[in-house]
Amino acid sequence: MQQLIAFIRKEFYHIFRDRLTTAILLLLPIMMLILVGYAITTEVRNTGIAVYDPSNDIATQAIINKLEASGYFGVTRYLSSPDEIEHVFREGKTGLAVVFSERFYENLMHTGEAQVQLLADGADPNHAITVTNYATTIIASYQQDLLKTSVSGIPYQISPEVKLLYNPEMKGAYNFVPGVMGMILMLICAMMTSVSIAREKELGTMELLLVSPMKPIYIILSKVVPYFFLSIINLTTILLLSVYLLKVPIAGSLFWLIILALLFIFVSLALGLLISSMVEKQLVALLISGMALMMPVVFLSGMLFPVENMPWLLRMISEIIPAKWFIMGVRKIMIKGLTYSSITKELLILGSMAVVLIVVSLKKFKIRLE
Amino acid sequence: MKVVTVQNISRNFGKVEALKDISFDANEGEIFGIIGPDGAGKTTLFRILTTLLLADSGKATVDGFDVIKDYKQIRNRIGYMPGRFSLYQDLTVEENLKVFATVFNTTIEKNYDLIKDIYQQIEPFKTRRAGALSGGMKQKLALCCALIHKPSVLFLDEPTTGVDPISRKDLWDMLIRLKKQKITILVSTPYMDEASLCDRIALIQDGRFLKIDTPAAMTREFDKILWSVQSDTMSKLLADLRRHKKVKTCFAFGETHHITLEDSTLTPGEMKNYLTGLGHTGIEISPIAASVEDCFMDLSGNQTEK
């Protein structure tokens, strides 16, 4: 036990004496979140909208007025056919096209339901997301107004159908926070653990540790514990920043969010150990954790690109990426505010990944040099 | 008592035969030197004995324990100093020593006596980071770390490579003191002049032991006539000596060339005439006693330039 404590202390010396790396590790999440934060708080004032309104009745007029009154939108064009939309977007003055269905008010009154389509230029997805979100909110508030004045008690339902042209997958701005969380934690845990074990091998100190009564499990634990702590610091910074700076509230239970994050940290650490058992050089460890871990996390976890639209092979690969499950879980708990029962699947999958990875990396730990 | 026994150890790395059928024993409280050039297989042998590598064939025991089956016991009782400096460069001298004391479940205080002589030399720098030490200091610290748990067998892989002459002497003085404490020391070195400080030596080349004996017996058994030859133009001299029919071998040995004779009837006078005839000046020829290096060159049978 004393061995273990001394070794964990030693590991902290390594971390804190390498000031540059420590600074990067602690500042990286802050930088990434702020970057992302600015990217998503795009100003949408005075966005030009093009309207196709075949109904031209009180309801559609009211909605258009409400959109203009918000200060975010100004109607630049009235279209005579939906076919013009693409042309209008090409001109670049229009950020959003609002397409009402025919007999809008009539449908709304009789069936209690009417459709409106919101089309945004997906070439700039962040802007498109914000714009459609605003428009959706405004339409929803009109619906509220209708309900309040309604005497018949019909639950009027205007269903805005949002479509991003050129980028059909709707990307919620909030998606970035879970994504960055997954990326940062994976980066720090897996990369740093594997690099620090590879460093012992590269500098020859592993040779000395092997020729000693030091138990392999102690060597492994002494590497895992400090980065576990660092990750918890990072987790705290990310959550604080996203709540107070980016105004992304934690909708669900903080407790289960933390449980989920700790489990993910554990999986990432275990992955780092596995990588380190296969490599001898720091650079290789860095490349493997950079390329083989970060790339799939960025591209296949659903953080930037929708996994649903990918070929089946990539979808299959994405299933085994821990970050995908973590990000899904965080979305459910943090963004959607669902209860823990909704993330049982994610917890179970991450849990079994952790067990398998730990067992494999313990088995693969070399008690000799080869 | 035999503390280290090695029987017919062989080890290949792919097609390269690093060790071929090595056998030897080392006794308690003995300094056993393994002498040979770089790439001869010294490090591989040390790694097999320190349980870091497995031999392809053969058997070896250290302190009575089998290097494969009982590797855990061996790791408890040996001290190992790898050829490359392998301490934590970003930890201070004292922290390094503490870490290795803890690894072996002991404290610096408990075995301070053993390392005192050498640790005192680096103690003034105990708050300096190990990476900032000079080559000699690094090796002294590494030796302290290898000794901190009072091992019964000490494996030192080229401890004096890259070390200044004074620190080299300090290190060897230390080894001779440790020997008195009944610690068996296996030391490898490419420096032939350190061989005479060992109790017994094994000459190794290309993964094979050429000979195992005490340094004195080894040089005594050198049965050829050996001269040291000097002139003002040493590189020409080497070529001219090698061209002489009665010269068997000729190697450059620092300031002089050492030659062995094919034909014992040749006299120094005849040789001097031969060389003067070739335009050499300042010629000095003297018969000498063999050093370990002469034995090595002779046994290695290497006729080409050193």
Image (tube, coloured by chain):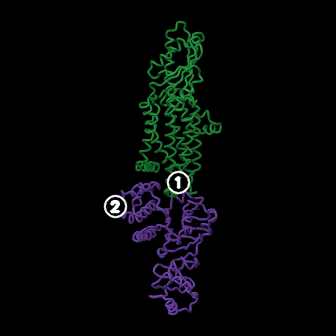
Chain colours: A green, B purple
Q: Residue reaching furthest top?
A: A151
| Coordinates of residue B190 in the picture (x, y in percent) | 50, 71
Establish if A137 lies above or below B59: above
**Residue B129 vs residue A333: left or right?**
left
Chain under numbered label 2: B
Q: What kind of element bears circle 2?
A: helix
Task: Determine the residue positioned at 51% across, 52% down.
Answer: A282
Q: Which residue is mark 2?
A: B124
| Coordinates of residue B294 in the picture (x, y in percent) | 52, 80
Q: What kind of element bears circle 1?
A: loop
Query: CB under 8 Å between callouts 2 and 1?
Result: no
Task: Give the crowd class for mark 2: few <14, some 14-19, many >=20 residues within 10 Å.
Answer: few
Q: Which residue is mark 1?
A: A281
Q: Are marks 2 and 1 on the same chain?
A: no
| Coordinates of residue A308 in the picture (x, y in percent) | 61, 33
| Coordinates of residue B165 in the picture (x, y in percent) | 41, 71
Residue A325 in sight from this viewpoint = no
Amino acid carrying label 1: it is Lys
In this view, the mark in front (2 or 1): 1
Chain under numbered label 1: A
The CA distance from mark 2 to mark 1 is 34 Å
Residue nearest the viewer, comparing A86 with A167: A86
Amino acid carrying label 2: it is Pro
Residue A274 in sight from this viewpoint = yes
Q: Quadrant of residue B59?
A: bottom right
Establish if A99 lies above or below A316: above
Quadrant of the snapshot with the C terminus of chain A: bottom right
